[in-house]
Image (spheres, coloured by chain):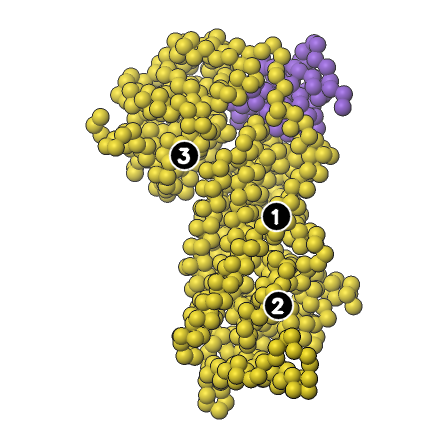
């Protein structure tokens, strides 16, 4: 073989297209970005032998090539070779579902019109078999004139045959397209002449067929208005001849399919009731299904708590070990403080939550891969429709539970602009994984007993987003984004075994993204916060605070320590008292230092703003510092509360998984607060609510700006969410205080 | 012939006409709901679940976009 070829992979959603792409490319893949548009298309390399490899482009799943949105238009442009930085594909692989060949061939017939060879990969032959469907592949090859390759993408079967067929198809003549009624063909030719044949006939046909579609939008401005008028007249003539658009397309294509594909497929007279059907009768049941949904969600959140504990302990001990090392190796000073308090405690404090994020993504990936997410969307559609949205908005919202950025990007499947914007604007209200660290810290510290409470509270935090988001959406749809409730149609895929590699891939991607963020944005924020809290570092007597603190700590270490096993005597009592006095001295010195630091001064000045929420200046500063990226809050709390800390190793004997050394320190400090100490649980809830509702993420605002192409919407999101968060936290604290008091 | 929402769970019907905005009719056709196709109601309700060919479709339409169907004899509602 000579030059490497480019292969486009096209198919309906849920055909196993991504599975096939992964099987063909292995790890040689990356997300391709295409000029100007941010549609996610994956590119990969498929190797045939040691010397020969080809490029595969995985296009987003679609039911047809009638472009209704900008993203679908990009797919069409790519297939026609109109994109500047991508070679026009040499071969198109159309992946179809064996259990529903007729419908999947609809897209295939459109692909046949692009002037490139098409290879059909028939996936999920086993599912068709269990449903009693028989496919005569030889006959199908004969009637359609296309290379037809049976594959089983999840078991990597038939891949070699597919690769061979693809290579063999290069340069062969494109398939004969489905013949439309001659009158339709005449109209297309006439319009093509009007445009001086500067546009492919495929696009002319799309212009004619898709009333109000994207081709029309694009081409009608490219040509003089006469052409648009001619298109309208052509449509009228077709309607008069009973070939009106869009009906003529479906009739013609399905006619061809019935004739050619129908012949090769034998279905049982009675549909076989599959395992998936039986599972569905429970899972989408109005009562049982909803109940199971809530139980599943609770199990998810509880499992995150319990499952991650051992790993978190490990990371914590590693962090402490390193901190002790640093203390022993280096002299007190700004550099040691930066390394130990800013970077190790700040970034390390965020990284501790990596195990939980991995578990969350694993469970979400499993639910998505096995097909449960579509059931959840179905169950939720009724509620969503009451808020002026539909089940399709539910999936972006659910994805936002992991992270709002991909969630907002997932709204592109929503065709109506107003519904899409409403979904985008409320997506950041869903509790994303970046909020988890704070949830874990506070729930583990203040709301960990009895055993079921952490799961319930965590579920409650997610529920807060799930309830608030639709309500805000409703408000938006009634005001700034007024419009009708959209119709809803969605395919429900069959249940299948989740694939280990898919789940693993998602975990690695999410884990890496989290670590990357911790290493860049969060690291930078932490250094800034550390500096604001470290400087100025001069005591009234001219000494620097950290040297003074270190001296006190050394004093403490050298003081006699009691053996717990020894009985209490006058001497041990005196030792204890002396140690306690020394610790108090350390604490008050650390407090003085913080209060006179830049961050402390700002916090104290702003304290009246935070007071109604039950927060002191420390909590307020941690919240303020988290506006660029909310994960920063845990690191900031770590810096603020750990400066006076003596030895975090001492308080690690707890049996509670959520109980971290930082949690203990916070609990002690909050309890000692003369004003809010009694209501520390209410303070915790107030802080939880604030973080649940606030838009503390620059990346999210950036993606909203990119997706809405206006700075107004991100600004709007920021303002409404911050207001909402303040109000929510205010209510939480004031109500909580009444309940406790 | 009656609108789709009158079809009970378990009943099968043939689609007679898909009525509504051109875009919506087109989308329905792509998904396999077009005059002549056989469908079965799996779960009725505001958002219903249909068996169309080899796949299941969730559907919620409004008053302006209706699907008219003719029930097929010998199909009975499931009693649950």
Horizontal side, residue B45 vs residue A124: left or right: right
Q: CA distance from mark 3 to mark 1?
A: 29 Å
Check the picture and name the quadrant holding the C terminus of chain A: bottom right
Q: Which residue is mark 1?
A: A303
Q: CA distance from mark 3 to mark 2?
A: 46 Å
Chain letter of mark 2 equals A
State whether residue A250 appears in this view: no
Residue A53 occupies quadrant: top left
* Label 2: how many Cα within 10 Å (few below 14, some 14–19, many 20+): some
Q: CA distance from mark 2 to mark 1?
A: 23 Å
Which residue appears at 48% of the width and 64% of the height? A319
User: What tint does the image give chain A?
Assistant: yellow
Horizontal side, residue A296 vs residue A741: left or right: left
Have a look at marks 3 and 1 and say if they share a chain: yes
Horizontal side, residue A602 vs residue B68: left or right: left
Q: Position of residue A179 (x, y in %)?
A: 40, 12
* Label 1: how many Cα within 10 Å (few below 14, some 14–19, many 20+): some
Element class at badge 3: helix
Q: Nearer the viewer, residue B16 or A404?
A: A404
Chain letter of mark 3 equals A
Q: Position of residue A458 (x, y in %)?
A: 64, 53
Q: Nearer the viewer, residue A501 or A488?
A: A501
Have a look at marks 3 and 2 and say if they share a chain: yes
Which residue appears at 40% of the width and 32% of the height? A23
Residue A27 occupies quadrant: top left
Compare marks 3 and 1 and give the one earlier in the sequence. 3
Compare marks 2 and 1 and give the one earlier in the sequence. 1
Check the picture and name the quadrant holding the N terminus of chain A: top left
User: What tint does the image give chain B?
Assistant: purple
């Amino acid at each position: 073989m000579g030059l490497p070829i480019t292969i486009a992979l096209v198919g309906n959603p849920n055909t196993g297209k991504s599975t096939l792409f992964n099987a063909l490319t292995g790890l040689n893949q990356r997300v391709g970005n295409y000029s100007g548009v941010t549609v996610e298309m994956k590119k990969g390399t498929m190797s045939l032998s040691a010397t020969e490899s080809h490029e595969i482009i995985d296009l987003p799943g679609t039911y047809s090539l009638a472009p209704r949105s900008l993203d679908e238009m990009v797919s069409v442009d790519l297939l026609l070779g109109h994109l500047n930085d991508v070679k026009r594909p040499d071969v198109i692989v159309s992946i179809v579902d064996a259990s529903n060949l007729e419908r999947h061939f609809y897209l295939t017939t459109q692909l046949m019109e692009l002037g490139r060879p098409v290879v059909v990969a028939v996936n999920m032959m086993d599912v068709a078999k269990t449903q009693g469907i028989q496919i005569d592949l030889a006959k199908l090859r004969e009637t359609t004139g296309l290379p037809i390759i049976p594959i089983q993408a999840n078991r990597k079967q038939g891949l070699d045959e597919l690769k061979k067929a693809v290579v063999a198809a290069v340069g062969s003549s494109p398939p004969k397209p489905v013949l439309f009624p001659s009158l339709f063909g005449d109209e297309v030719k006439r319009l093509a002449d009007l445009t001086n044949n500067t546009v492919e006939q495929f696009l002319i046909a799309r212009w004619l067929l898709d009333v109000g579609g994207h081709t029309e939008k694009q081409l009608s401005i490219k040509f003089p208005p006469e052409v648009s008028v001619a298109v309208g007249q052509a449509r009228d003539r077709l309607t008069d001849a009973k070939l009106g658009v869009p009906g003529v397309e479906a009739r013609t294509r399905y006619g061809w399919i019935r004739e050619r594909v129908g012949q090769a497929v034998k279905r049982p007279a009675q549909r076989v009731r599959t395992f998936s059907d039986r599972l569905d009768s429970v899972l989408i049941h109005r009562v049982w299904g909803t109940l199971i949904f809530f139980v599943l969600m609770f199990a998810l959140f509880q499992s995150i708590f319990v499952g991650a504990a051992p790993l978190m302990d490990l990371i914590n001990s590693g962090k402490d070990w390193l901190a002790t090392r640093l203390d022993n190796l280096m002299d007190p000073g700004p550099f040691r403080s930066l390394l130990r308090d800013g970077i190790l405690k700040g970034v390390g404090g965020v990284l501790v939550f990596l195990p939980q994020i991995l578990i969350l993504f694993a469970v979400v990936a499993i639910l998505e891969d096995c097909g449960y997410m579509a059931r959840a969307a179905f169950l939720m559609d009724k509620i969503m429709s009451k808020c002026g949205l539909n089940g399709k908005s539910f999936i972006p919202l659910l994805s936002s539970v992991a992270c709002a950025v991909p969630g907002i990007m997932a709204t592109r499947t929503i065709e109506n602009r107003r519904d899409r914007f409403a979904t985008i604007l409320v997506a950041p209200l869903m509790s994303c994984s970046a909020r988890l660290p704070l949830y874990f810290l506070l729930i583990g510290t203040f709301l960990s007993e009895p055993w079921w409470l952490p799961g319930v509270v965590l579920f409650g935090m997610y529920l807060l987003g799930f309830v608030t988001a639709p309500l805000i959406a409703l408000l938006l749809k009634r005001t700034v984004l007024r419009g009708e409730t959209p119709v809803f149609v969605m395919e429900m895929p069959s249940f299948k075994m989740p694939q280990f590699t898919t789940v693993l891939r998602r975990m690695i991607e999410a884990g890496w993204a989290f670590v990357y963020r911790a290493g860049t944005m969060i690291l930078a924020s932490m250094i800034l916060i550390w500096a604001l809290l470290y400087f100025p570092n001069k005591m009234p007597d001219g000494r620097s605070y950290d040297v003074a603190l270190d001296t006190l700590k050394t004093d403490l270490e050298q003081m006699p320590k009691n053996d717990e096993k020894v009985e209490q005597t006058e001497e041990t009592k005196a030792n204890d008292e002396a140690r306690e006095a020394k610790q108090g001295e350390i604490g008050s010195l650390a407090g003085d230092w913080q209060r006179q630091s830049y961050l402390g001064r700002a916090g104290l000045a702003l304290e009246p703003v935070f007071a109604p929420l039950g927060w002191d200046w420390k909590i307020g500063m941690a919240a303020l510092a988290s506006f660029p990226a909310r994960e920063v809050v845990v690191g900031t709390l770590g810096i603020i509360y750990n400066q006076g800390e003596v030895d975090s190793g001492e308080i690690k004997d707890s049996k509670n998984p959520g109980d971290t050394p930082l949690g203990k320190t916070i609990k002690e400090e909050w309890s000692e607060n003369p004003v809010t100490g009694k209501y520390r649980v209410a303070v915790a809830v107030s802080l939880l609510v604030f973080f649940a509702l606030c838009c503390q993420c620059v990346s999210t605002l950036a993606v909203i700006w990119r997706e809405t192409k206006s700075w107004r919407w991100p600004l709007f999101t920021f303002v409404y969410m911050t207001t909402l968060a303040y109000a929510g936290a205010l209510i939480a604290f004031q109500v909580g205080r009444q309940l406790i008091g | 012939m009656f609108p789709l929402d009158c079809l009970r769970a378990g009943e099968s019907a043939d689609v007679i006409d898909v009525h509504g905005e051109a875009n919506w009719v087109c989308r329905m056709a792509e998904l396999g709901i077009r005059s002549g196709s056989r469908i079965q109601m799996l779960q009725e309700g505001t958002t219903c679940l249909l068996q169309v060919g080899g796949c299941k479709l969730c559907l919620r339409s409004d008053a302006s976009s209706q699907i008219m169907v003719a029930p097929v004899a010998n199909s009975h509602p499931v009693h649950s």
